[in-house]
Image (cartoon, rainbow, N blue to C red):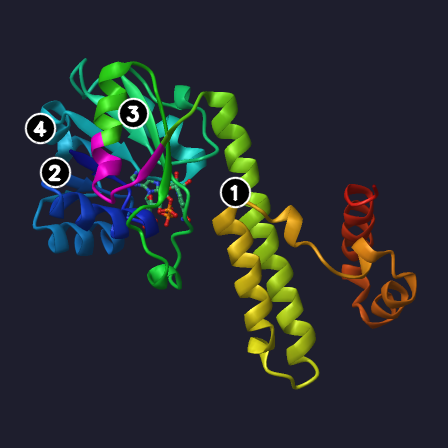
Amino acid sequence: MVLIGAGQVSRELAPVWKQAGHDILQVISRTEASARPLGEQLGCPWTTHLVDAAGALADAQVVVVAVTDGLIAEVAEGISAMVSPSCVMVHLSGATPLDALKGPRAVVWPIRSFNPKADNVPLEGTPTVIEASDAASFHAAQTLAQAWKAEIAEASGPQRAAAHLAAVMADNYANHMLAEAQEVLDQRNLPKTLLRNLVLGLTQGGLNGDARERQTGPAKRGDDATLERHRALLPDDMRDVYNALAAHIAKRHTP
Ligand SMILES: NC(=O)c1ccc[n+]([C@@H]2O[C@H](COP(=O)([O-])OP(=O)(O)OC[C@H]3O[C@@H](n4cnc5c(N)ncnc54)[C@H](OP(=O)(O)O)[C@@H]3O)[C@@H](O)[C@H]2O)c1
């Protein structure tokens, strides 16, 4: 395998691949600051220049393109003449079309946030979406995902796009609401962990797939007096968000 990109995801997945027996021939990244430490950690050559990786790219059975989403197609185009016709190109992006890659190709998208605070969220068992151009590429992708004992879901392009939308709604937007809620507490000198048990319930909805049945609160109950008191407390730039969510909850829960 050749790994292109030594960012947040590569730093976590590459050692797992190595541990699972994948032979990482070379790490290529944009700057020495990211390429060198990962190459040294994996005990393989590293470079910031594609030409220096020509030998490894020619030998690779799999190339993982783990760069910023907007650069995947450009990087894939740049290496397409350097890899063998049977080499499977893989990217890890939930949002990027499979056709950003060339030749035999696959997407391996672990549905998990890779961030500096994520080390308390297990990688093992992470639900992972695979989309592939052909059976051999699917098999190569499956082998990569098995390194973290993934719960694998095969998906078409449109299914993966919808799953990415769902992931952004569930993680990014819910987390943003949580961050805003913590600010409301913090501004009144209350501990930001006050919501801990509520969040445990929220998480159970994610684990069990029964979030709709767990909904409570003034918007669901149609408690207009409480909604009005909240509006008075809200920062101006959150009021529209609050109103839109309250209206949507009321609509969904109207018998
Ligand atoms: N982060 C997540 O939570 C998450 C979750 C699932 C999937 N993914 C996917 O994983 C992929 C990587 O994401 P990430 O979060 O690891 O991104 P990241 O932390 O921004 O890392 C991107 C890496 O690509 C390198 N790079 C950029 N342009 C390059 C080029 N032209 N040639 C070689 N290397 C280049 C960067 O080098 P420098 O370090 O030198 O700048 C950096 O090491 C993305 O497709 C993303 O959608 C991310």
**Residue 146 shown left or right of residue 172 in the figure:** left
* Foreground of the two, 143 or 223: 223
Q: Quadrant of residue 72?
A: top left
Task: Name the residue located 29 percent from the left edge and 44 percent from the top edge.
Answer: 30
Q: Check disc 1 and report its element: helix, strand or loop.
A: helix
Residue 78, numbered label: 3
Nearer to us of marks 4 and 2 is 2
Residue 112: percent from the left, percent from the top? 41, 48
Give the magenta-colored segment's residue range: 143-152
User: What is the spatial separation of the Cα atoms under label 4 and label 2, in whole angstroms?
Assistant: 18 Å
Nearest to the eye among marks 3 and 2: give it: 2
Residue 235 locus on image (x, y percent)? 79, 68
Q: For mark 4, what is the residue?
A: 55
Q: Which residue is mark 1?
A: 167
- Work out whether 36 lies above or below 232: above
Outermost residue to the bottom: 189
Mark 1 belongs to which amino acid? Ala
State the residue at coordinates (33%, 52%): 8
Count every numbered label the image shows and give the total: 4
The nearer-to-camera label among 4 and 1 is 1
Residue kind at label 3, given as amino acid type: Gly
Dot 2 alpha-carbon crowd within 10 angstroms: few under 14, some 14 to 19, many 20 or more: some
In the rendered image, which quarter contains the C terminus?
top right
Real-space Cα separation, disc 3 to disc 2, in angstroms:
24 Å
